[in-house]
Image (tube, rainbow, N blue to C red):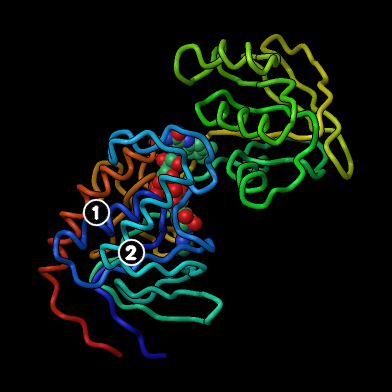
Amino acid sequence: MKPSTVDVLIIGGGPAGLAAAIELRALGVKEVRVVDREAQAGGVPRHSKHPGYGLRDLYRFMTGPAYAHLYVTKALKAGVIISPSTTATQWGDGTTVELTSPAGIEIIHAKAVVLATGARERARNARMVAGARPAGIYTTGSLQQAVYLRHLDIGTKAVIVGAEHVSFSALMTLAHAKVKTVAMITDQSKHQSIPGAKLLSQLIYRFRFMAKSHIVEIHGTSRVTGVSVSDAAGKLTTIECDSIIFTGDWIGDTEMARRGSVEISADSCTTSRAGVFAIGNLRLPIKSADQCALEAREAAKTIAAHVSSTPALKNG
Ligand SMILES: Cc1cc2nc3c(=O)[nH]c(=O)nc-3n(C[C@H](O)[C@H](O)[C@H](O)COP(=O)(O)OP(=O)(O)OC[C@H]3O[C@@H](n4cnc5c(N)ncnc54)[C@H](O)[C@@H]3O)c2cc1C
Protein backbone atom coordinates (compact mmCIF):
# COMPACT_ATOMS: atom_id res chain seq x y z
CA MET A 1 0.00 0.00 0.00
CA LYS A 2 1.37 3.42 -1.02
CA PRO A 3 1.60 5.90 1.85
CA SER A 4 0.08 9.34 1.45
CA THR A 5 1.84 12.34 2.94
CA VAL A 6 0.94 15.24 5.19
CA ASP A 7 3.03 17.87 6.98
CA VAL A 8 1.59 17.16 10.43
CA LEU A 9 -0.57 14.24 11.51
CA ILE A 10 -2.28 14.84 14.87
CA ILE A 11 -3.64 11.75 16.62
CA GLY A 12 -6.54 12.84 18.86
CA GLY A 13 -9.04 15.62 18.18
CA GLY A 14 -9.59 16.89 21.73
CA PRO A 15 -8.82 20.45 22.90
CA ALA A 16 -5.05 19.84 22.73
CA GLY A 17 -5.02 18.31 19.23
CA LEU A 18 -7.39 20.91 17.76
CA ALA A 19 -5.67 23.90 19.43
CA ALA A 20 -2.29 22.70 18.11
CA ALA A 21 -3.76 22.18 14.62
CA ILE A 22 -5.22 25.71 14.49
CA GLU A 23 -1.94 27.23 15.68
CA LEU A 24 0.10 25.21 13.18
CA ARG A 25 -2.04 26.55 10.34
CA ALA A 26 -1.61 30.09 11.72
CA LEU A 27 2.16 29.51 11.73
CA GLY A 28 2.05 28.65 8.03
CA VAL A 29 2.12 24.84 8.09
CA LYS A 30 0.31 23.79 4.92
CA GLU A 31 -1.18 20.37 5.56
CA VAL A 32 -2.44 19.55 9.02
CA ARG A 33 -4.65 16.52 9.53
CA VAL A 34 -6.34 15.53 12.79
CA VAL A 35 -7.67 11.99 13.23
CA ASP A 36 -10.00 10.88 16.01
CA ARG A 37 -11.40 7.43 16.69
CA GLU A 38 -14.76 8.88 17.79
CA ALA A 39 -17.55 9.66 15.30
CA GLN A 40 -16.98 13.38 16.00
CA ALA A 41 -13.89 15.32 17.02
CA GLY A 42 -13.91 17.43 20.21
CA GLY A 43 -12.55 15.03 22.83
CA VAL A 44 -13.87 14.76 26.38
CA PRO A 45 -15.68 18.16 26.42
CA ARG A 46 -18.13 16.79 23.84
CA HIS A 47 -19.88 14.81 26.55
CA SER A 48 -19.02 16.98 29.57
CA LYS A 49 -22.29 18.87 29.58
CA HIS A 50 -21.66 21.50 32.24
CA PRO A 51 -20.13 24.98 32.21
CA GLY A 52 -16.48 25.44 33.16
CA TYR A 53 -14.68 25.47 29.82
CA GLY A 54 -12.87 28.12 27.81
CA LEU A 55 -11.92 30.77 30.36
CA ARG A 56 -8.18 31.06 29.75
CA ASP A 57 -7.94 30.07 26.08
CA LEU A 58 -11.11 31.51 24.53
CA TYR A 59 -11.98 34.09 27.23
CA ARG A 60 -15.50 32.66 27.52
CA PHE A 61 -17.30 30.55 30.08
CA MET A 62 -18.86 27.67 28.14
CA THR A 63 -20.29 24.18 28.46
CA GLY A 64 -18.12 21.30 27.25
CA PRO A 65 -20.16 20.56 24.08
CA ALA A 66 -20.22 24.27 23.07
CA TYR A 67 -16.47 24.47 23.65
CA ALA A 68 -15.79 21.32 21.58
CA HIS A 69 -18.03 22.57 18.79
CA LEU A 70 -16.24 25.94 18.70
CA TYR A 71 -12.81 24.28 18.44
CA VAL A 72 -13.96 22.01 15.60
CA THR A 73 -15.47 25.00 13.76
CA LYS A 74 -12.29 27.08 14.20
CA ALA A 75 -10.11 24.19 13.01
CA LEU A 76 -12.17 23.61 9.86
CA LYS A 77 -12.16 27.35 9.16
CA ALA A 78 -8.36 27.37 9.53
CA GLY A 79 -8.09 24.66 6.85
CA VAL A 80 -7.37 21.72 9.12
CA ILE A 81 -8.47 18.35 7.73
CA ILE A 82 -10.43 16.46 10.39
CA SER A 83 -10.95 12.70 9.96
CA PRO A 84 -13.39 11.29 12.54
CA SER A 85 -13.97 7.54 13.04
CA THR A 86 -10.28 7.08 12.25
CA THR A 87 -7.99 5.32 14.71
CA ALA A 88 -4.21 5.37 14.65
CA THR A 89 -3.47 1.70 15.07
CA GLN A 90 0.19 1.07 14.32
CA TRP A 91 3.56 2.65 13.56
CA GLY A 92 5.74 2.17 10.53
CA ASP A 93 9.30 3.51 10.46
CA GLY A 94 9.93 6.93 12.03
CA THR A 95 6.94 9.17 11.43
CA THR A 96 4.84 6.73 9.41
CA VAL A 97 1.52 5.74 10.96
CA GLU A 98 -1.18 3.23 10.04
CA LEU A 99 -4.77 4.50 10.30
CA THR A 100 -7.87 2.32 10.44
CA SER A 101 -11.31 3.68 9.50
CA PRO A 102 -14.53 2.34 7.95
CA ALA A 103 -12.84 3.04 4.57
CA GLY A 104 -10.07 0.55 5.42
CA ILE A 105 -6.38 0.88 6.25
CA GLU A 106 -4.36 3.93 5.26
CA ILE A 107 -0.64 4.55 5.65
CA ILE A 108 0.38 8.14 6.33
CA HIS A 109 3.89 9.49 6.15
CA ALA A 110 4.18 12.83 8.01
CA LYS A 111 6.97 15.30 8.70
CA ALA A 112 5.69 15.38 12.30
CA VAL A 113 3.32 13.18 14.26
CA VAL A 114 1.62 14.67 17.31
CA LEU A 115 0.20 12.38 19.95
CA ALA A 116 -2.80 14.06 21.61
CA THR A 117 -4.62 10.97 22.82
CA GLY A 118 -5.67 12.36 26.22
CA ALA A 119 -6.12 10.55 29.52
CA ARG A 120 -8.65 8.18 31.00
CA GLU A 121 -9.86 7.28 34.44
CA ARG A 122 -8.58 4.08 35.97
CA ALA A 123 -11.41 1.58 35.55
CA ARG A 124 -12.61 -0.93 38.12
CA ASN A 125 -10.28 -3.76 36.99
CA ALA A 126 -7.17 -1.63 37.32
CA ARG A 127 -8.23 -0.61 40.87
CA MET A 128 -8.19 -4.23 42.05
CA VAL A 129 -11.74 -4.14 43.40
CA ALA A 130 -12.94 -7.63 44.33
CA GLY A 131 -16.40 -9.12 43.90
CA ALA A 132 -18.87 -9.81 41.12
CA ARG A 133 -18.82 -8.26 37.63
CA PRO A 134 -22.42 -7.15 37.12
CA ALA A 135 -23.76 -4.39 34.87
CA GLY A 136 -24.01 -0.85 36.27
CA ILE A 137 -20.30 0.01 36.65
CA TYR A 138 -18.98 3.17 34.95
CA THR A 139 -16.22 5.74 34.92
CA THR A 140 -17.26 9.41 34.69
CA GLY A 141 -16.31 9.36 31.00
CA SER A 142 -18.43 6.29 30.17
CA LEU A 143 -21.29 7.61 32.35
CA GLN A 144 -21.33 10.94 30.52
CA GLN A 145 -21.20 9.25 27.13
CA ALA A 146 -24.11 6.99 28.17
CA VAL A 147 -26.20 9.88 29.53
CA TYR A 148 -25.47 12.74 27.13
CA LEU A 149 -24.57 11.02 23.86
CA ARG A 150 -26.52 7.73 23.99
CA HIS A 151 -29.37 8.66 26.39
CA LEU A 152 -29.21 5.28 28.13
CA ASP A 153 -30.93 4.30 31.38
CA ILE A 154 -28.36 4.45 34.22
CA GLY A 155 -30.27 3.16 37.27
CA THR A 156 -31.76 4.71 40.40
CA LYS A 157 -29.14 4.79 43.19
CA ALA A 158 -25.41 5.36 42.70
CA VAL A 159 -22.20 5.28 44.70
CA ILE A 160 -19.37 7.53 43.48
CA VAL A 161 -15.82 6.34 44.12
CA GLY A 162 -13.36 9.26 44.33
CA ALA A 163 -13.70 12.88 45.43
CA GLU A 164 -11.78 14.85 42.77
CA HIS A 165 -13.17 17.64 40.53
CA VAL A 166 -14.45 15.04 38.10
CA SER A 167 -16.32 13.20 40.89
CA PHE A 168 -18.52 16.28 41.38
CA SER A 169 -19.05 16.40 37.61
CA ALA A 170 -20.27 12.76 37.87
CA LEU A 171 -22.62 13.85 40.67
CA MET A 172 -24.22 16.46 38.39
CA THR A 173 -24.48 13.99 35.51
CA LEU A 174 -26.23 11.46 37.77
CA ALA A 175 -28.68 14.15 38.95
CA HIS A 176 -29.34 15.03 35.30
CA ALA A 177 -30.11 11.33 34.63
CA LYS A 178 -32.44 11.31 37.70
CA VAL A 179 -30.17 8.93 39.60
CA LYS A 180 -29.82 9.55 43.36
CA THR A 181 -26.22 9.56 44.61
CA VAL A 182 -26.28 7.78 47.95
CA ALA A 183 -22.58 8.00 48.83
CA MET A 184 -19.24 9.43 47.72
CA ILE A 185 -16.27 7.39 48.92
CA THR A 186 -12.61 8.41 48.99
CA ASP A 187 -9.55 6.80 50.49
CA GLN A 188 -8.16 10.31 51.11
CA SER A 189 -8.88 12.27 54.32
CA LYS A 190 -10.87 14.92 52.40
CA HIS A 191 -12.10 15.79 48.91
CA GLN A 192 -9.64 17.18 46.33
CA SER A 193 -11.90 19.64 44.54
CA ILE A 194 -12.34 23.40 45.02
CA PRO A 195 -13.12 24.65 48.58
CA GLY A 196 -16.82 24.36 49.34
CA ALA A 197 -17.54 21.82 46.57
CA LYS A 198 -18.44 19.05 49.01
CA LEU A 199 -20.50 21.23 51.36
CA LEU A 200 -22.48 22.86 48.58
CA SER A 201 -23.14 19.65 46.69
CA GLN A 202 -24.11 17.80 49.90
CA LEU A 203 -26.65 20.56 50.58
CA ILE A 204 -28.09 20.19 47.08
CA TYR A 205 -27.83 16.43 46.52
CA ARG A 206 -27.86 15.07 50.11
CA PHE A 207 -25.42 12.16 49.91
CA ARG A 208 -23.18 10.50 52.48
CA PHE A 209 -19.47 11.45 52.28
CA MET A 210 -17.11 8.69 53.43
CA ALA A 211 -13.45 9.76 53.77
CA LYS A 212 -10.56 7.32 54.44
CA SER A 213 -12.76 4.52 53.07
CA HIS A 214 -12.57 2.10 50.19
CA ILE A 215 -14.74 -0.46 48.42
CA VAL A 216 -13.86 -4.00 49.41
CA GLU A 217 -16.52 -5.83 47.41
CA ILE A 218 -19.14 -5.29 44.73
CA HIS A 219 -22.41 -7.25 45.11
CA GLY A 220 -24.88 -8.37 42.43
CA THR A 221 -25.00 -10.96 39.65
CA SER A 222 -26.57 -9.46 36.53
CA ARG A 223 -26.87 -5.92 37.99
CA VAL A 224 -25.06 -4.18 40.87
CA THR A 225 -27.07 -4.50 44.11
CA GLY A 226 -24.64 -2.91 46.54
CA VAL A 227 -21.10 -2.38 47.76
CA SER A 228 -19.24 -3.22 50.95
CA VAL A 229 -17.09 -0.34 52.15
CA SER A 230 -14.34 -0.43 54.76
CA ASP A 231 -13.27 2.64 56.76
CA ALA A 232 -9.75 3.30 58.10
CA ALA A 233 -10.50 1.25 61.24
CA GLY A 234 -11.64 -1.73 59.14
CA LYS A 235 -15.34 -1.29 59.97
CA LEU A 236 -17.50 -2.67 57.15
CA THR A 237 -20.66 -0.95 55.87
CA THR A 238 -22.89 -2.28 53.09
CA ILE A 239 -24.55 0.31 50.86
CA GLU A 240 -27.45 -0.57 48.58
CA CYS A 241 -27.06 0.82 45.05
CA ASP A 242 -27.51 -0.21 41.40
CA SER A 243 -24.70 1.87 39.86
CA ILE A 244 -21.07 2.56 40.78
CA ILE A 245 -19.04 5.35 39.21
CA PHE A 246 -15.26 5.09 39.45
CA THR A 247 -14.01 8.66 39.07
CA GLY A 248 -10.61 10.31 38.64
CA ASP A 249 -7.34 8.45 39.29
CA TRP A 250 -6.12 9.42 35.82
CA ILE A 251 -3.69 7.65 33.52
CA GLY A 252 -2.43 8.98 30.19
CA ASP A 253 -3.89 7.18 27.16
CA THR A 254 -0.47 5.86 26.17
CA GLU A 255 -1.52 2.89 24.01
CA MET A 256 -0.25 4.39 20.74
CA ALA A 257 2.92 5.71 22.38
CA ARG A 258 3.64 2.27 23.89
CA ARG A 259 3.17 0.58 20.51
CA GLY A 260 5.96 2.70 19.10
CA SER A 261 8.12 2.58 22.27
CA VAL A 262 7.75 6.37 22.32
CA GLU A 263 8.88 7.81 25.63
CA ILE A 264 6.93 10.90 26.68
CA SER A 265 8.51 13.69 28.68
CA ALA A 266 6.58 15.55 31.40
CA ASP A 267 8.63 18.71 30.75
CA SER A 268 8.57 19.07 26.98
CA CYS A 269 6.45 18.22 23.94
CA THR A 270 9.33 16.33 22.32
CA THR A 271 9.59 12.55 22.71
CA SER A 272 12.23 9.85 22.37
CA ARG A 273 11.27 9.37 18.67
CA ALA A 274 12.48 12.06 16.26
CA GLY A 275 9.59 13.97 14.69
CA VAL A 276 7.04 12.66 17.21
CA PHE A 277 5.56 15.07 19.76
CA ALA A 278 3.14 14.67 22.69
CA ILE A 279 0.67 17.24 24.01
CA GLY A 280 -2.36 17.62 26.29
CA ASN A 281 -3.43 15.29 29.05
CA LEU A 282 -1.50 12.41 27.55
CA ARG A 283 1.65 14.12 28.81
CA LEU A 284 0.64 14.88 32.38
CA PRO A 285 -2.87 13.99 33.51
CA ILE A 286 -4.93 15.73 34.42
CA LYS A 287 -5.10 19.38 33.48
CA SER A 288 -8.07 21.53 32.54
CA ALA A 289 -9.01 21.79 28.86
CA ASP A 290 -7.93 25.43 28.54
CA GLN A 291 -4.55 24.59 30.06
CA CYS A 292 -4.14 21.76 27.52
CA ALA A 293 -5.11 24.11 24.67
CA LEU A 294 -2.69 26.85 25.78
CA GLU A 295 0.17 24.37 26.14
CA ALA A 296 -0.67 22.91 22.72
CA ARG A 297 -0.48 26.37 21.11
CA GLU A 298 2.98 26.79 22.63
CA ALA A 299 4.05 23.31 21.47
CA ALA A 300 2.90 24.18 17.92
CA LYS A 301 5.87 26.57 17.65
CA THR A 302 8.34 23.72 18.27
CA ILE A 303 6.43 21.44 15.87
CA ALA A 304 6.27 24.10 13.12
CA ALA A 305 10.03 24.68 13.44
CA HIS A 306 10.59 20.94 13.01
CA VAL A 307 8.35 20.88 9.92
CA SER A 308 10.13 23.78 8.26
CA SER A 309 13.53 22.12 8.79
CA THR A 310 12.35 18.76 7.38
CA PRO A 311 12.88 18.09 3.64
CA ALA A 312 9.80 17.63 1.43
CA LEU A 313 8.26 14.15 1.58
CA LYS A 314 7.86 11.97 -1.50
CA ASN A 315 4.37 10.63 -2.16
CA GLY A 316 4.19 6.84 -2.42
C1 LIG B 1 -16.05 14.54 33.49
C2 LIG B 1 -15.03 15.59 33.13
C3 LIG B 1 -15.30 16.92 33.40
C4 LIG B 1 -14.36 17.91 33.07
N1 LIG B 1 -14.67 19.23 33.32
C5 LIG B 1 -13.81 20.19 32.91
C6 LIG B 1 -14.17 21.58 33.03
O1 LIG B 1 -15.24 21.94 33.53
N2 LIG B 1 -13.28 22.52 32.55
C7 LIG B 1 -12.09 22.16 31.98
O2 LIG B 1 -11.34 23.05 31.53
N3 LIG B 1 -11.72 20.85 31.87
C8 LIG B 1 -12.55 19.88 32.32
N4 LIG B 1 -12.21 18.55 32.16
C9 LIG B 1 -10.87 18.22 31.62
C10 LIG B 1 -10.84 18.32 30.09
O3 LIG B 1 -11.92 17.65 29.49
C11 LIG B 1 -9.51 17.75 29.59
O4 LIG B 1 -8.47 18.49 30.20
C12 LIG B 1 -9.34 17.86 28.08
O5 LIG B 1 -10.39 17.21 27.40
C13 LIG B 1 -8.01 17.25 27.66
O6 LIG B 1 -7.81 17.45 26.31
P1 LIG B 1 -6.93 16.45 25.43
O7 LIG B 1 -7.03 16.96 24.04
O8 LIG B 1 -5.59 16.29 26.04
O9 LIG B 1 -7.61 15.02 25.55
P2 LIG B 1 -9.13 14.44 25.23
O10 LIG B 1 -10.12 15.52 25.36
O11 LIG B 1 -9.20 13.25 26.09
O12 LIG B 1 -8.99 14.04 23.70
C14 LIG B 1 -8.22 12.95 23.27
C15 LIG B 1 -8.81 12.43 21.98
O13 LIG B 1 -7.93 11.44 21.43
C16 LIG B 1 -8.69 10.46 20.77
N5 LIG B 1 -7.85 9.26 20.63
C17 LIG B 1 -7.23 8.55 21.61
N6 LIG B 1 -6.50 7.54 21.06
C18 LIG B 1 -6.66 7.63 19.71
C19 LIG B 1 -6.15 6.87 18.61
N7 LIG B 1 -5.31 5.83 18.76
N8 LIG B 1 -6.54 7.24 17.35
C20 LIG B 1 -7.39 8.27 17.15
N9 LIG B 1 -7.89 9.03 18.17
C21 LIG B 1 -7.53 8.71 19.42
C22 LIG B 1 -9.90 10.28 21.70
O14 LIG B 1 -11.00 9.74 21.00
C23 LIG B 1 -10.16 11.73 22.16
O15 LIG B 1 -11.13 12.37 21.36
C24 LIG B 1 -13.13 17.55 32.48
C25 LIG B 1 -12.85 16.19 32.22
C26 LIG B 1 -13.80 15.22 32.53
C27 LIG B 1 -13.51 13.77 32.24
In the picture of the structure, the residue carrying the numbered disc 2 is 76
Q: Quadrant of the C terminus?
A: bottom left
Residue 309 at x, y = what percent? 10, 69
In the picture of the structure, the residue carrying the numbered disc 1 is 270
Q: Residue at x 67, y 52 (%)?
A: 150
Q: Amino acid at mark 2?
A: Leu
Which picture quadrant has residue 156? top right
Which picture quadrant has residue 230? top right
Vertical placement of residue 11 versus 177, above or below:
below
- Check mark 2 vs ligand 1: CB closer than 8 Å? yes or no: no
Q: Which mark, residue 160?
A: none
Which picture quadrant has residue 240? top right
Vertical placement of residue 11 versus 199, above or below:
below
Q: Residue at x 66, y 44 (%)?
A: 147
Residue 270 at x, y = what percent? 24, 54
Residue 242 at x, y = what percent? 81, 34
- Of residue 157 and residue 230, the one placed in the foreground of this image is 157
Please indicate whether residue 99 sits to the left or right of residue 316 in the image: right
Vertical placement of residue 58 versus 186, above or below:
below
- The Cα–Cα distance between marks 2 and 1, rounded to whole angstroms, is 26 Å
Helix, strand or loop for disc 1: loop
- Check mark 1 vs ligand 1: CB closer than 8 Å? yes or no: no
CA neighbours of label 1 inside 10 A, class few (<14), some (14 to 19), many (20+): many
